[in-house]
Image: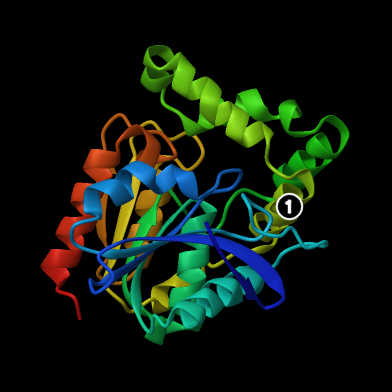
Amino acid sequence: MAFARINGVLLHYRLSGQQDGPAIIFANSLGTDLRIWDRVTALLADRYRMVCYDKRGHGLSDSPSGDYRLADHVADLTGLLDHLGIRRATLCGVSIGGLIAQGVALHQPDRIRRLVLCDTASKFGDAALWNSRIEAIAHGGMAAIADGVMDRWFSPDFQMRKPEDLAGWRNLFLRSDVAGYASTCATLRDTDLTGAVGRIACPTLVIAGSADKSTPVELVRGLAAAIPGARFDVIPGAGHIPSIEQPDALAVLVADFIEEAGHG
């Protein structure tokens, strides 16, 4: 395990792969930690230098009090890159990790070589949705929303064929820090990049899982359409977190995109 204090916040991260290879940074979703990328990074380990990290409020990273802004997450990630001596990298984010990736591409564009946005959007729901979720966990803890989240995260096929895996990921979710989760819900509640993503200029790949109930295919397709020159792909059968359900397909898409675009 490795840790760094960035902007006063302790961040947990992991380095893997080829330390002299092109860098890829992976940003995880709401209510998960860096382990969601394990199978993808294993498949890419022979070619790339990879960094996975727990954003603030998640995993082994600190959970500062108060609502988190997108700017906080962007500063954390770019600060971690500085700490690791990584000037530019491909950034791959899923869900809110994809929103953070969009924020970096907009506010620190010189740090991004390529952008991979998985099952994400420029805006997630409305204030009523996120306030309701924050209130639910304040009164009932993570268990109050766990079953609904699992249904949105995972395809029906995965839920039927892999009940033990489903139970394990549910356990991970249940162990999330309530305050950190609520503070990150505030990021999603308060962020709307709809009018800004047209300014993203780096090569971008946008990916949707065909069975995603959190960010349905057409929502993700709309993000791709709004980013000039973005490529759009669908992973058949995958839910909201393709790195868990379809790691082989995701790894191929990421590697092909980087190799086609060149390392910059």
Q: Residue at x 38, y 84 (%)?
A: 87
Q: In the figure, 176 relative to 46: above or below?
A: above
Q: Is residue 39 left or right of residue 9?
A: left
Q: Which residue is mark 1?
A: 180
The C terminus sits in image quarter: bottom left
**Residue 165 at x, y percent in the picture:** 45, 23
- Which amino acid type corresponds to the residue marked 1 in the rendered image? Gly
Identify the secondary structure beneath mark 1.
helix
Q: Residue at x 45, y 29 (%)?
A: 154
Q: Quadrant of residue 133?
A: top right
Q: In the figure, 218 relative to 71: above or below?
A: above
> How does the figure colour the protein chain or chains?
rainbow
Q: Nearer the viewer, residue 237 or 243?
A: 243
**Residue 169 at x, y percent in the picture:** 53, 30
Q: Residue at x 70, y 30 (%)?
A: 145
Q: Is residue 105 left or right of residue 43?
A: right
Q: Is residue 69 left or right of residue 66?
A: left
**Residue 223 at x, y percent in the picture:** 40, 58
Q: Residue at x 34, y 63 (%)?
A: 50
Q: In the figure, 172 relative to 206: above or below?
A: above
Q: Nearer the viewer, residue 45 or 152?
A: 45
Q: Nearer the viewer, residue 237 or 256?
A: 256
Q: Is residue 261 left or right of residue 127?
A: left
Q: Quadrant of residue 143?
A: top right
Q: In the figure, 196 relative to 182: above or below?
A: below
Q: Residue furthest right?
A: 139
Q: Residue furthest front?
A: 1
**Residue 14 at x, y percent in the picture:** 45, 59
Q: Residues within 10 Å of mark 1 (few under 14, many from 20)?
A: many
